[in-house]
């Protein structure tokens, strides 16, 4: 059992609500935590506070004696100076680190690895991050979605405040960040630079239980979400293993589920390897998240964050990589 009943808020935990902080640090059920808060047995900087109290770096959280038994085995109370450094070897196979510092973890996700665990699969990016973090006070989690069969850049915050900042960027109605994808589609699609595609998307579940997104007119469905992106033709192949093919670059203005896949399929140019939406069969879906620009934040809850311009080129099999590299 720890010698002290004090928890110290680490820099990575600053900005969290007290309840969330306690749930991360303790294995106690929520009713017990609420009871300790109501009865004043949990105090912050020697004062009584509510569950929604926002914590700052270095805050002192006093626990009741019975809560000390809820500390995960091998964890430490006094880890306020902890700085999480993800070990690249613990993320293998396939999942690689592009960049990491005190705020951001940027990963290159392989095709076939889901971002979150599900009923049909246990392995995922989230699970690998959780396992690699060990007893760290803050466990990074993916800040956005990436389709299971889509490869490329995926980011996670290494502090609570930066994770909140990432969520605000991806959830914003106006594009505050830049997301670019590379994709091979079937057929010849000659587009002028920055050709804008606008659609209204709505989910549809097939009889087999597989969810597909479909494009509708704005008046067809009141819950349809607007999807917009700019597309540019990069290269055209008249003879590939899948017949005629076009390499496109997509710059998202919105981040709807399956947006790029549906926008291309709706126009008769399905992504190669995207069998769900009618694309020609290939060993994997040729869709890659290759560039992500995160703007600087001068003052987010008292914190300044740097600018990031991340890039990861796809590792596609020949002749697609040859065509992209121009050799």
Image (spheres, helix red, strand yellow):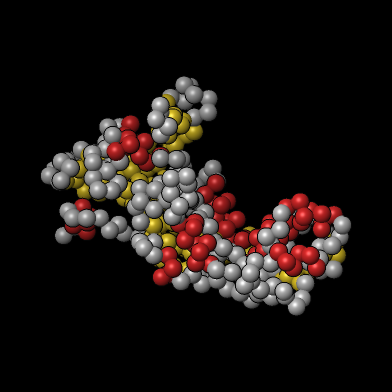
Q: Please count the marks in the image.
A: 0
Which picture quadrant has residue 103? bottom right
Which picture quadrant has residue 20? bottom right
| Nearer to the camera, 113 or 75 | 75
Q: Residue at x 77, y 76 (%)?
A: 4
Residue farthest to the bottom, as pictured: 3
Where in the figure is residue 110, as x and y percent of width and height? 35, 56
Q: From what the image shows, is residue 91 above or below residue 272?
A: below
Q: In which quarter of the image is the C terminus?
A: bottom left
Q: Which residue is drawn at 52% across and 54% down?
A: 143
Q: In this view, does 161 lie to the left or right of 43?
A: left
Where in the figure is residue 69, as x and y percent of width and height? 73, 66
Where in the figure is residue 210, as x and y percent of width and height? 40, 34
Which picture quadrant has residue 325? bottom left
| Nearer to the camera, 248 or 71 | 71
Where in the figure is residue 7, as x and y percent of width and height? 73, 70
Residue 306 makes an appearance in the image: no
Residue farthest to the left, as pictured: 239
Q: Is residue 113 left or right of residue 170?
A: left
Residue 40 makes an appearance in the image: yes
Q: From what the image shows, is residue 96 above or below residue 173?
A: below
Q: In which quarter of the image is the N terminus?
A: bottom right
Q: Is residue 271 left or right of residue 243?
A: right
| Nearer to the camera, 264 or 107 | 107
Q: Which residue is drawn at 43% across and 24% down?
A: 217
Q: Which residue is drawn at 60% across and 65% down?
A: 138
Q: In this view, does 143 lie to the left or right of 3?
A: left
């Amino acid at each position: 059992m720890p010698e002290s009943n004090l928890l110290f808020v680490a820099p990575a935990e600053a900005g969290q609500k007290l309840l969330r902080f306690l749930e991360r640090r303790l294995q106690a059920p929520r009713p017990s935590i609420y009871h300790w808060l109501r009865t004043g047995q949990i105090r912050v900087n020697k004062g009584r506070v509510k569950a929604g109290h926002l914590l700052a770096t270095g805050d002192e959280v006093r626990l009741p004696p019975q809560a000390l038994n809820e500390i995960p085995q091998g964890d430490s109370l006094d880890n306020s100076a902890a700085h999480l450094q993800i070990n690249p070897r613990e993320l293998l196979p396939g999942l690689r680190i592009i960049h990491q510092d005190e705020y951001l973890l940027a990963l290159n996700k392989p095709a076939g690895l889901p971002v979150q665990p599900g009923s049909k699969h246990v392995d995922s990016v989230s699970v690998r991050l959780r396992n690699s973090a060990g007893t760290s006070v803050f466990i990074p989690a993916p800040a956005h979605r990436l389709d299971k069969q889509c490869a490329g850049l995926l980011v996670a915050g290494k502090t609570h405040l930066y994770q909140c900042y990432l969520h605000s960027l991806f959830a914003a109605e106006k594009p505050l960040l830049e997301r670019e994808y590379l994709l091979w589609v079937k057929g010849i699609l000659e587009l002028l630079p920055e050709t804008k595609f606008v659609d209204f998307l709505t989910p549809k579940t097939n009889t087999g239980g597989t969810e597909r997104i479909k494009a509708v007119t704005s008046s067809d469905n009141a819950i349809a979400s607007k999807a917009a992106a700019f597309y540019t033709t990069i290269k055209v192949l008249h003879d590939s293993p899948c017949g005629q093919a076009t390499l496109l670059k997509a710059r998202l203005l919105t981040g709807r589920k399956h947006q790029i896949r549906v926008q291309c399929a709706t126009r008769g140019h399905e992504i190669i390897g995207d069998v769900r939406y009618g694309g020609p069969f290939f060993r994997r879906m040729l869709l890659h998240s290759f560039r992500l620009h995160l703007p600087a934040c001068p003052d987010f809850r008292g914190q300044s964050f740097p600018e990031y311009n991340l890039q990861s080129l796809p590792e596609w099999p020949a002749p697609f990589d040859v065509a992209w590299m121009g050799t």
